[in-house]
Amino acid sequence: MCDDRGADRASDVGMARTAASAAKSSPDVSRADPGDSRNRKVRFDIHAVIDNLREAVAPFADAAMFELRDRGYGTAFQQLVACILSIRTLDEVSLPAAVRLFDVAPDAEAMSRMTVREIDRLIGTVTFHEPKARQIREMAVRVTEEFGGDVPCDFEVMTSFRGVGPKCASLALGVACDALEIAVDVHVNRVTTRWGYVDAGSAEVVRRQLMEKLPRAYWIEINRLLVPFGKHVCTGNLPKCSICPVLRYCQQVGVRAHR
Ligand code: SF4
């Protein structure tokens, strides 16, 4: 089994590179050839799938929260603020807005001294910026007054802030606190469901299923991999199955048409 897997992985890596390059260079790919050997399904192997995904997403921009952390905006407070900004907003828009805000007010104390209007001016490009500005200031004031300026690495506390749901709390815990958490967003939900790895359900249902079967080593990484993979390969409409490096592991649940 080990030998087979080594060979599988070598071939998978090649396919992943092809997928990444094709996905990047050509938005319009041809339909999968039914005679293609990659269409023959094999038993799902999460380790091989993760290996393939690492290769496949390497050319794409990192998931926003991880990119922010790598750029020095990695506190739990900054992660929660950035996640609020990202709700219903493209990363390409929310990420620069978060950086603009953090450059003026890098922590809760500084942000609590800003007015809602000042915050709103800096984040005006994101969707629902006015209510988000109110939520962010409210959180900054609470974090300063109740927690001495630092957001505790605690799911219950995080989700007690207005605007912070389970996805943002899980992401902040995983990215800023190094806590073992699985952040299930639309990409993680859609891709793992299509694989047939989990049953379709709400983010919370999928999160619980993943916590039962996904090896802990991948709990934080799964979001980092599936956000760019879901954006560029396993897209919401017409996923690019014909160039997908994990096609043979994937049951393509619910996929009626693909590229
Ligand atoms: S649905 Fe298609 S693109 Fe998505 S993971 Fe499965 S084979 Fe890949």
Image (tube, rainbow, N blue to C red):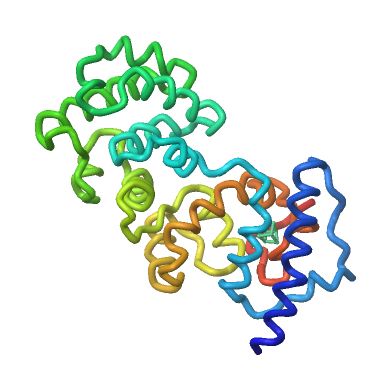
Instruction: State the image quarter where residue 138 is shown.
Output: top left
Identify the residue at horizontal 64%, vertical 51% (top origin).
57
Q: Check the image and report above or below for 169 versus 241.
A: above
* 151 displayed left or right of 133: left
Q: Position of residue 207 (x, y in %)?
A: 40, 60
* 170 displayed left or right of 115: right
Q: Name the quarter showing ligand 1.
A: bottom right
Q: Position of residue 210 (x, y in %)?
A: 43, 66
Q: Check the image and report above or below for 45 versus 210.
A: below
Identify the residue at horizontal 87%, vertical 51% (top origin).
30
Work out which quarter of the rendered image holds the N terminus and state it: bottom right
Identify the residue at horizontal 23%, vertical 36% (top origin).
161
Q: Check the image and report above or below for 196 versus 244.
A: below
- The extreme bottom residue here reads 1
Identify the residue at horizontal 51%, vertical 48% (top origin).
186
Q: Position of residue 77 (x, y in %)?
A: 28, 36
In terms of depth relative to the viewer, which is nearer, 149 or 27? 149
Q: Position of residue 6 (x, y in %)?
A: 69, 79
Instruction: State the image quarter where residue 7 is shown.
Output: bottom right
| Badge count | 0
* 165 displayed left or right of 194: left
